[in-house]
Amino acid sequence: MAKIKFTLLGKNELSNIYVRLIDGRKTDIKLNTGLVIEKEFWNATTGEIIDLEAVKERKTKVVKVLSPEEKENELQRLSKVKVVRKELEHLQNEIKTELRTGKAQGTEINREWLETVILKAKGLIKEQDTLFYNLIESYKLKLPTMVRNGKIGVAPGTIRNYNTTLQRLKKYEEAKNKQLHITDIDFNFHTDFLKFAQTKLKLSLNSIGKDIKQFKTVILDAKENGLKVNDQALTRKFNAPSEKTLFITLNEDEISDIKKFEGANHLENAKDWLIIGCWTGCRVGDLMQLSEDNVLITPKGQKFIRYTQSKTEKQVDIPLHNDVLEIIDRLGGFPRPISDQKFNEYIKTVCQEIGMTEQVYGTRQNPETHLKETGYFEKWQLVRSHICRRSFATNHYNKLPNKLIMAVTGHSTEKMLLNYIGETENDHIDDFLSVWNAANIKDEKIVELAAKTS
């Protein structure tokens, strides 16, 4: 059975009151309650304030002996004793209640847990303030009013990401049959959530990594706002897992085949957007916002598209490719905007009908279970909106300087661009070897020719 004891620490007459919680062999925690008392009012044997009857008797005596000013000071001291006693009784009851609740929910009873109980007993934090789900929800609601890089708010996609993270955390809590407090977010949670997300939710490491990053963001925000957090969640070990992304692209021959597609109006509309996307590198959200207002002309008379990326808020200028210009001239403007979902659905159909059926290795969302699955599929099955940006970056890589490609894709560093298109930073090795090997072959031929002529 758990034991709760109070004791004084310190050599001064006014001493700090500490609480010690003992529960079995593994739990023995001692913490400062933040309360103080004069030693003469403390019973070291029982670990509590002296009996109130004794305080009352002392109060009666001092009134008769002391001067008016001394009486007032003494009465204030005795009044403080009564207040501290009530607070200690309240704290003891709170620890008992929280201990029963915590054990029932499987909460780890540790130093951080006891610190939180003490703060709650003193009214410094409320129950709902420490629930991790509520903290993420509160942070998400603050995002539209936050100032970042001199601008207010975030992209709609960021809000959607937090909603997704909240849904996954809720499923985790339901599976574990407990509500998590912010101090529960530690290494054990990191390991267990990763396992749950992989085995039960069938998520990729990259998807789980986004959740972990958002967990850390909320924890840092909570810490800055004075909440007690588990320091383990702020270390590098509490990291966001990742893996190499499997993706497919459309090469220029395949884009030419797509241009030839003829079919239903809604499919041709999606086909035109797909071609525009492959030659502009736009994310689908930005792609569907393009209009004639985005088409500008340089002083030299060259037409180009200018838009601001919703995710990064970077301005992008991209010349009009002939394929894009042909579509705009044919339609008298841009195609009809459609939803992300319909765009993904329609471009799959377009690619299937032009015969894009070769088996390729990749990841797709199962149309029935809506879970991601990895394996070999016909290429059209792996086509989705992001193929536009990746195709743009891949088709121009090694043809244009990386900085020019980055100006369109919005990547801040070459490393980010290389990761995005699946290249590595040691690809330059092949370039060097090809040059050197060519030089060696040339030298060998010179030696051979010299031998023949000597």
Image (tube, rainbow, N blue to C red):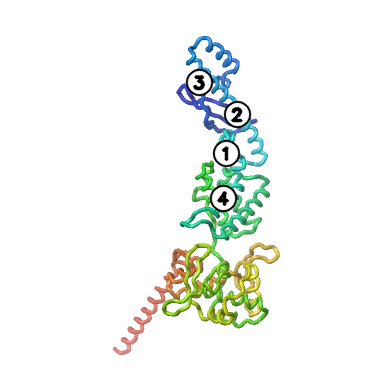
Q: Residues within 10 Å of mark 2 (few under 14, many from 20)?
A: some
Helix, strand or loop at disc 1? Answer: loop
Query: Which amino acid, by three-letter code, is at mark 4?
Result: Tyr
Residue at mark 1 to residue at mark 2: CA–CA distance:
22 Å
Question: Residue extending furthest left?
Answer: 454
Q: Which mark is residue 4?
A: 2
- Marks 1 & 2, CB-CB < 8 Å contact: no
**Closer to the camera, 299 or 226?**
299
Give the mark nearest the N terminus, 2 or 4.
2
The residue to which callout 1 is attached is 125
Residue at mark 4 to residue at mark 3: CA–CA distance:
45 Å
The residue to which callout 4 is attached is 139
The residue to which callout 3 is attached is 39
Q: Quadrant of the N terminus?
A: top right
Residue at mark 2 to residue at mark 3: CA–CA distance:
20 Å
Give the mark nearest the N terminus, 1 or 4.
1
Residue 278 point in image, percent of width and height: 54, 74
Q: Which mark is residue 286?
A: none
Task: State which quadrant residue 253 falls in.
Answer: bottom right
Q: Quadrant of the C terminus?
A: bottom left
Helix, strand or loop at disc 2? Answer: strand
In this rendering, the label closer to the viewer, 4 or 3: 4
**Closer to the camera, 124 or 145?**
145
Residue at mark 1 to residue at mark 4: CA–CA distance:
17 Å
Give the mark nearest the N terminus, 1 or 3.
3
